[in-house]
Amino acid sequence: GDKVKQSPSALSLQEGTNSALRCNFSIAATTVQWFLQNPRGSLINLFYLVPGTKENGRLKSAFDSKESYSTLHIRDAQLEDSGTYFCAAEGSNMGYKLTFGTGTSLLVDP
Amino acid sequence: EAAVTQSPRSKVAVTGGKVTLSCHQTNNHDYMYWYRQDTGHGLRLIHYSYVADSTEKGDIPDGYKASRPSQENFSLILELASLSQTAVYFCASSDALGRSSYEQYFGPGTRLTVL
């Protein structure tokens, strides 16, 4: 089965609204990274997390290693937030390798 | 600012031909990685390296070889390209501390089409 499960798989938001994306892990994740793949295909680093939370502007992310999940909250969504969001986990005893989820495709409408 | 570049940015290859994808980083990072992304999916790890002249198999290494001639350069080689290897390929680099890596920084990707 999938080691990193993302939900939802797709999401449509109106500009100015809030939402939350989630990743559940079936591996013992030690660190988590969140990326945005923009419409041009580039992968943009959003967060690198050890257990805990981080905030950057309208984005906030949390990683709970004991409960094996991570969340990404988007506040006041803007058109430029559209794209595909990926989480990726590094697992204990797996070396310096990331396992990616299958992504959440986000479309922000005016 | 992290800098990972890839060449070529796109390539069309014939089935059975040899393809070499190149990656260069100026981050002074020890670790480098090659991933592939298929349409509508996440990234999957093909090969990685933590030191020059050494490479390791990732999760899907079959049909691919890798070469790390220097800290800055990491190549992915398809000796006999097949239709199933049509994908977008991403290179990444990261530093490492103890048993946990720092964040990975990705190149812009190479779109490979095998006909």
Image (spheres, rainbow, N blue to C red):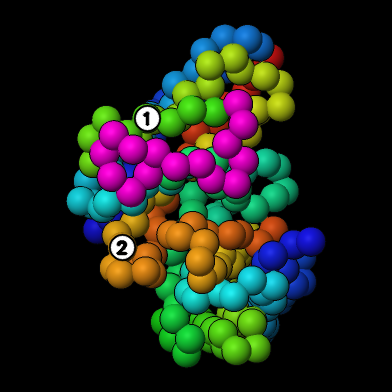
Left/right placement of residue A103 relative to residue B17 reads: right
User: Which quadrant of the figure has residue A29?
Assistant: bottom right
Q: Quick one: quadrant of the C terminus of chain B?
A: top right
Q: Amino acid at mark 2?
A: Ala
Mark 2 or mark 1, earlier in chain: 1
Residue B19, horizontal then vertical, whole percent: 50, 18
Residue position for label 1: B67
* Residue at 27% over, 51% down: B30
Left/right placement of residue A77 relative to residue A106 reads: left
Q: Is residue A41 above or below residue A106?
A: above
Q: Quick one: quadrant of the N terminus of chain B?
A: bottom left
Residue position for label 2: B96
Residue A41 located within the stretch drawn in magenta: no
- Between the residue at mark 2 and the residue at mark 1, the CA separation in whole angstroms equals 20 Å
In the rendered structure, which segment of residues is drawn in magenta? B49-63
Of A100 and B115, the residue lying toward us: A100
Left/right placement of residue A45 relative to residue A40 reads: left
